[in-house]
Image (spheres, rainbow, N blue to C red):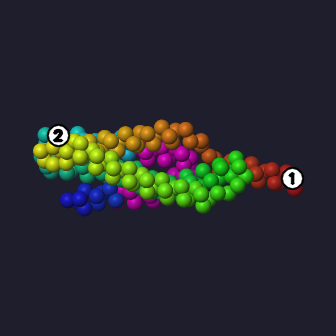
Amino acid sequence: MVSVLMAPFIVMALVALSFMPALSKRVPIKWLFFTSLTIMAIGLPFMYPIAVMNVSTNAKIAMTVVLFSFCGIGQGMLYVLLTPLIGQIIDRDEAKTGERREAAYQALHGLNWKASQALAVLVAAQSMRLLGNSVERPWGVFLLGPLAGGFGLIGMVICWTYPVVRRKRRAAAESVEVEAAN
């Protein structure tokens, strides 16, 4: 059943991946990343109402397929946008400090990725330990979606404070400055 439910998630993530290069030429990375977090923050909490609805199992499976398809779009966007976002952060840091510190940023990204995976396991384990993970006490499992949506909301707030970087305009301005100097 997990494979059946994850297949639409993976398919939609791949579809979203394919559109990111074209979209990123028109929309700043910040807003694409914010959109991906929004999709996840909106979608994941719906895991709870689907779980507690008084409908047939087939209806729950169908709703879950739709939900996972929707969340797959956000996840696919996240996968492809992290690398250019790190590049923008490195470029911004260079503009402020005059130094290129790619290795430090890549190391920090790797550390944060591992820490977020560990935090996800910790939150899930504690939710299920405190609220249950059985047929008799399912609330720890049911509330994981809303908890994940809450983390998505926190990510949205952080993303909102990130500056919009316009490479094309800066590159065009630099080329104009170079031509004026010649």
- Residue 22 visible (yes or no): no
Residue at image position (59%, 41%) is 163
Q: CA distance from mark 1 to mark 2?
A: 69 Å
Label 1 neighbour load within 10 Å: few <14, some 14-19, many 20+: few
User: Mark 1 sits on what residue?
Assistant: 181
Q: Is residue 19 left or right of residue 3?
A: right
Whichever of labels 1 and 2 marks the residue nearer the N terminus, that label is 2
| Above or below: residue 106 compared with residue 123 | below
**Is 129 placed left or right of 181 in the picture?**
left
| Residue drawn at (56%, 54%) of the image | 86
Callout 1–callout 2 Cβ contact below 8 Å: no
Dot in front, 1 or 2? 2
Amino acid of disc 1: Ala
Majority secondary structure of magenta residues: helix
Is residue 61 shown left or right of residue 16? left
Pinpoint residue 175: horizontal percent, then vertical percent: 76, 54
Residue 106 quadrant: bottom right
The magenta segment is 11-39
Queried whether the magenta region covers residue 25, the answer comes back as yes
Q: At 59% from the left edge and 43% from the top edge, which residue is drawn?
A: 164
Looking at the image, residue 44 lies above or below residue 83: above
